[in-house]
Image (tube, rainbow, N blue to C red):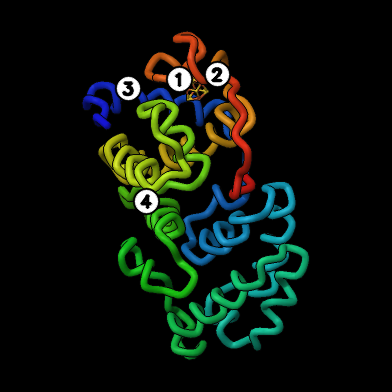
Amino acid sequence: MRLPPREVSSDFSRRLRAWFRRRSRDLPWRRTRDPYHVLVSELMLQQTQVSRVVDYYARFLERFPTLSHVARARVGRVEEAWEGLGYYARARNLHKLARRVTDRGRDTTATLPSSPAELRALPGIGAYTAGAVASFAYEKRAPLVDTNVSRVLLRMFAPSLSPKSGAGQRAAWKLAESVLPRTGGATWTHNQALMELGALVCTARVARCSECPVTMHCASSGVKGTKQQQPEPRISRAR
Ligand code: SF4
């Protein structure tokens, strides 16, 4: 796979960000830079639809406003607040993480680290979530790849690779890194926009190329007669 030239990746990102500013959904976790709040939203969104997460997110943060509140609670209380979202390992990992970061709740000002490497060392945080917290809370220039992002990037720049293959995943991460804009602030918008494009326009079920802001750079665009509206069998990320 060849990475796109700098002028292509710059134009791709610029168009994507402009589209996001016009068309994105107003979601509560996009209005915050609190690392703990961003983490809660990302954990909830891993297997649950956006519309359901909106309610749970607000209720959970009302009950546990900070990491130290989570750490001081019994794990059963945290699981109880998670009830209805399923995949309770996420709640248990959040509890474990909160106890580690806040010294069992004693440090009420402790917060999450900002580098993806340090974030990944914490319970329940994988490569995607580390990139999401670094980028969405700290506005770091960090790449992220989830199901939606890998689908979009591979359709765009490496259509012969499957997102389900190891080679496809490695290519998606390389592409995600190579198309990042220069600043952390722009990276926040860029990463949100990539995910939004995968959720609304270039979806697993259908590629709406005629509505896509980056169709001119896309190797799978309907304009070029390939891959448009090809269904994929399964998605693992709900948004
Ligand atoms: S042009 Fe079509 S296939 Fe390419 S990213 Fe946009 S919606 Fe997806």
Q: Which residue is mark 3?
A: 11
In the rendered view of the protein, which quadrant contains the C terminus? top right
| Disc 1 element | loop
Q: CA distance from mark 3 to mark 1?
A: 17 Å
Q: Residue 102's spot in the image, x, y percent?
A: 45, 83
Image coordinates for residue 199, horizontal then vertical, percent: 59, 36
Please identify the quarter of the rendering in which residue 217 is found.
top left
Q: Is residue 3 above or below residue 30?
A: above
Quadrant of the image containing the N terminus: top left
Task: Look at the image and tell me whether residue 224 can be seen.
Answer: yes
Q: Amino acid at mark 1?
A: Ser
* Residue 185 seen: no
User: In the image, is the residue at mark 1 within 8 Å of ligand 1 by its beta carbon?
Assistant: yes
Which residue type does callout 3 highlight? Asp
- Select label 4 or label 2 by which is in front: 2
- Mark in front: 1 vs 4: 1
Residue type of the residue flagged with mark 4: Glu
For disc 4, the marked residue is 139
Left or right of 176: which side holds 125?
A: right
Label 2 sits on a secondary structure element that is loop
Mark closer to the chain start, 2 or 3: 3
- Check whether the beta carbons of the residues at disc 1 and disc 2 lie within 8 A of each other: yes
Q: Position of residue 72 (x, y in %)?
A: 59, 88
Q: Which residue is mark 1?
A: 220
To which quarter of the image does residue 89 belong? bottom right
